[in-house]
Image (cartoon, helix red, strand yellow):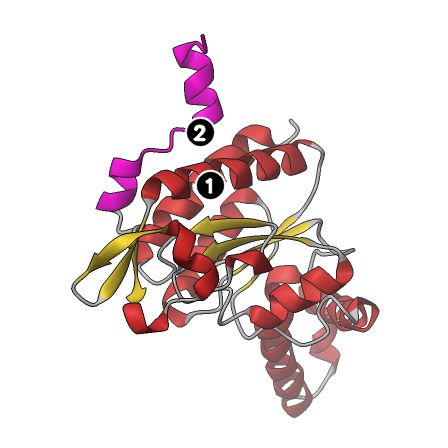
Amino acid sequence: MVSKSKEKKEGYGLDPGEMIKAGVHLGHRVSRVHPQMQSYLLGQRDTIHIINTELTCQKFREALKFIEDLVSRGGILLLVGTKPHARELTQRVAREIGMPYVIERWLGGTFTNFPEIKKRIDYFRELEEKKKKGELEKYTKKERAKIEKELQDLDLKFGGIKNLQKLPEAILVLDMVKDRLACKEAREKGVKIVGISDTNADPTLADYPIPANDDAISSLNYILGKIKEVILKAKPK
């Protein structure tokens, strides 16, 4: 018999009831369902599909176990949340757990042409360092304004990954439809994919799919909150 303490630990505190309160179970309109998501559906309410939260718990546990093991070994999880309403949440959680993130458009080649991307990141870091040391003061006002504009552009593109020295071991994709290019590049480079799979997404794109609502902030907040808890506990001290 499994003890209650062990059961709680293995379950990561996941509760179908809490998921329902957070709207995790609410999918898209029935006309937008992906065939591969059929097995995760409980039924439909009016015009939208309802996700089976028991299955969400099961798949989310598998994802959390993978993340826990990865982080305990010092691995890196890159968070990808480019939908406008999810950017602030993604950035805040990523900073709290000390992981890289992408909240603007995924740049083609981020993984598949990483050496070139890293050159741009190194250049960005170099400019930041020059600014920090006051080395930009030797330039004219017009030149400084141009450099400041360049710094802003570089920060927008690379700010969340400026400390990335190599490809991460895994990515967490909040919307696998919108950021399918990130999934494609991750798969091509052997980077594991943890992905929230709403009813319009293909869960087979992810190594660890989490069948759940990828639109509601309450749902994303619940999922990212659990991931944050696991990472903070698993990080080597």
Report whether 18 appears left or right of 148: left
Per the image, the residue denoted by label 2 is 12
Q: Tell me how many marks there are.
A: 2
**Residue 20, percent across and down?**
25, 45
Task: Report the residue at 54% width, 43% height from top.
Answer: 97
Per the image, the residue denoted by label 1 is 60
Question: Where the N terminus falls, by quadrant?
Answer: top left
Q: Closer to the camera: disc 2 or disc 1?
A: 1
**N-terminal label among 2 and 1:** 2
Which residue is more in the foreground, 114 or 40? 40
Task: Report the residue at 56% width, 57% height from top.
Answer: 204
Task: Report the residue at 45% width, 11% height from top.
Answer: 2
Which residue is more in the foreground, 135 or 187? 187
**Residue 30, percent across and down?**
29, 68
Which residue is more in the foreground, 163 or 4? 4
Q: CA distance from mark 2 to mark 1?
A: 9 Å
Q: In the rendered structure, which segment of residues is drawn in magenta?
A: 1-21
Q: Is 201 located above or below residue 196 in the figure?
A: below
Circle 1 SS class: helix
Residue 184 image-quadrant placement: bottom right
Find residue 141 and name its label.
none
How packed is label 1: few (under 14 Cα within 10 Å), some, or many (20 or more)?
many
**Residue 80, percent across and down?**
54, 61
How packed is label 2: few (under 14 Cα within 10 Å), some, or many (20 or more)?
some
Q: Is 72 located above or below residue 174 in the figure?
A: above
Is 216 covered by the magenta stretch? Answer: no
> Which amino acid type is marked by label 2?
Tyr
Report whether 16 appears left or right of 185: left
- Dominant SS in magenta: helix
Is 2 covered by the magenta stretch? Answer: yes
Question: Where the C terminus falls, by quadrant?
Answer: top right
Q: Check contact, mark 2 vs mark 1: CB within 8 A.
A: yes
